[in-house]
């Protein structure tokens, strides 16, 4: 066998045995039909490994770091996010296998099964938290716009990190309770069977965002440094959550990110200008 071809097949082997163990680990975190599908895909990946081994005659060990990473990611971010992220690997495998179609007899069969895996993965997930992504987006967006704007205005009006931080915490807690209550009433009137869960996801997302936005004001004495880190944390939150939603929902990352960024930072800039004007007019000096 050509050495270049053998190297490619060995890489295919490693990918298949690694994914076998990943899906096996994920199946232990799933229940019901999701669990059965993951176990079946794990068996198929092992079968693919054996097919490539038939041509190379070599045993290959899995990438333990990748297995650990995806298992940990599933525990933190959920099975849905992890599997959707892995879909990119399935698509890459299909493209790579296309390169040996016609050269390796069993490549055609493996390609067909990889396509089936992708379709199964897309349709298999029924994870509770995904039902409340709308509530999470509502809480996170509202907190980013309201609290970042409030912090920006107060920062340049008061120029006292502790006062601004305290005001941010009080405002954030009050606003999170208000948002959660509004979400509860909205879902209840719409006939939702679990309005409390929607309210909980909204409130938790709001509080989570408030914590990171206000935190710098309790860590730094210089208001300019604190505000800089607040903007940095806000940017990180926007990036992280946009990436999460784009993976599990398949929405355009760039468009969604730019939309959230423009609104949140636009409001922060406007509030910053209002804070400066208010300080000049009222003459507050703390």
Image (cartoon, rainbow, N blue to C red):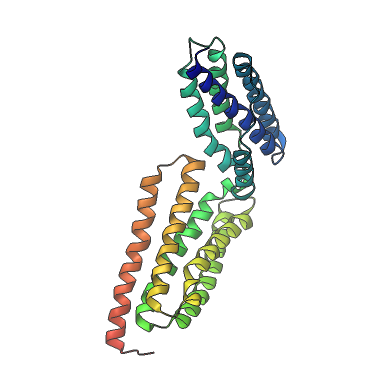
Of residue 208 and residue 161, the one placed in the foreground of this image is: 161
User: 29 or 191: which is nearer to us?
Assistant: 29
State the residue at coordinates (35%, 52%).
Answer: 258
**Residue extending furthest toward the front:** 3
Tally of numbered discs:
0
Q: Where is residue 71 in the image (x, y as percent from the top left)?
A: 64, 43
* x 56%, y 50%: residue: 132
Q: Where is residue 220 in the image (x, y as percent from the top left)?
A: 46, 77
Residue 37: image location, x then y, percent: 66, 29
223 horizontally vs 117: left or right? left
Could you tell me residue 266's position as x and y percent? 32, 63
252 sits left or right of 219 in the view:
left
Question: In the image, is 212 to the left or to the right of 275?
Answer: right
Which quarter of the rendering shows the C terminus? bottom left
Say which residue appears at 56% left-offset and 43% top-offset.
Answer: 81
Can residue 181 be seen here?
yes
Q: Where, by quadrant of the figure, is residue 227 drawn?
A: bottom left
Tell me where residue 49 sits by quadrant.
Answer: top right
Say whether residue 185 is visible: no
In this rendering, the answer to whether 25 lies above or below 255 is: above
Residue 285, picture quadrant: bottom left
């Amino acid at each position: 066998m050509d050495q270049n071809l053998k190297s490619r097949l060995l890489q295919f082997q490693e990918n298949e045995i690694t994914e076998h163990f990943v899906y096996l680990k994920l199946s232990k975190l799933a229940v019901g039909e999701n669990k059965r599908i993951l176990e079946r895909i794990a068996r198929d990946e092992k079968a693919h490994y054996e097919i490539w081994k038939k041509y190379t005659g070599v045993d290959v060990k899995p990438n333990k770091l990748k297995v650990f990473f995806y298992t940990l990611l599933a525990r933190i971010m959920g099975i849905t996010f992890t599997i959707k992220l892995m879909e990119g690997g399935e698509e890459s495998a299909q493209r790579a296998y296309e390169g040996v179609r016609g050269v390796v007899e069993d490549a055609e069969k493996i390609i067909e099964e990889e396509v089936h895996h992708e379709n199964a993965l897309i349709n298999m997930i029924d994870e509770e938290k995904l039902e409340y992504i709308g509530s999470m987006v509502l809480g996170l967006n509202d907190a980013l716009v309201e609290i970042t704007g409030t912090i920006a205005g107060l920062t340049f009006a008061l120029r006292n990190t502790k006062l601004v931080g305290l005001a941010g915490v009080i405002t954030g807690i009050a606003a999170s309770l208000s948002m959660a209550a509004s979400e509860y009433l909205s879902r209840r009137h719409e006939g939702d069977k679990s309005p409390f869960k929607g309210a909980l996801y909204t409130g938790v997302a709001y509080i989570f965002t408030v914590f990171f936005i206000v935190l710098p004001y309790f860590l730094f004495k210089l208001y300019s440094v604190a505000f800089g880190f607040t903007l940095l944390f806000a940017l990180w939150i926007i990036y992280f959550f946009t990436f999460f939603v784009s993976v599990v929902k398949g929405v355009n990352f760039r468009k969604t990110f730019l939309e959230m960024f423009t609104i949140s930072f636009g409001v922060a800039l406007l509030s910053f200008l209002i804070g400066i004007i208010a300080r000049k007019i009222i003459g507050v000096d703390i």
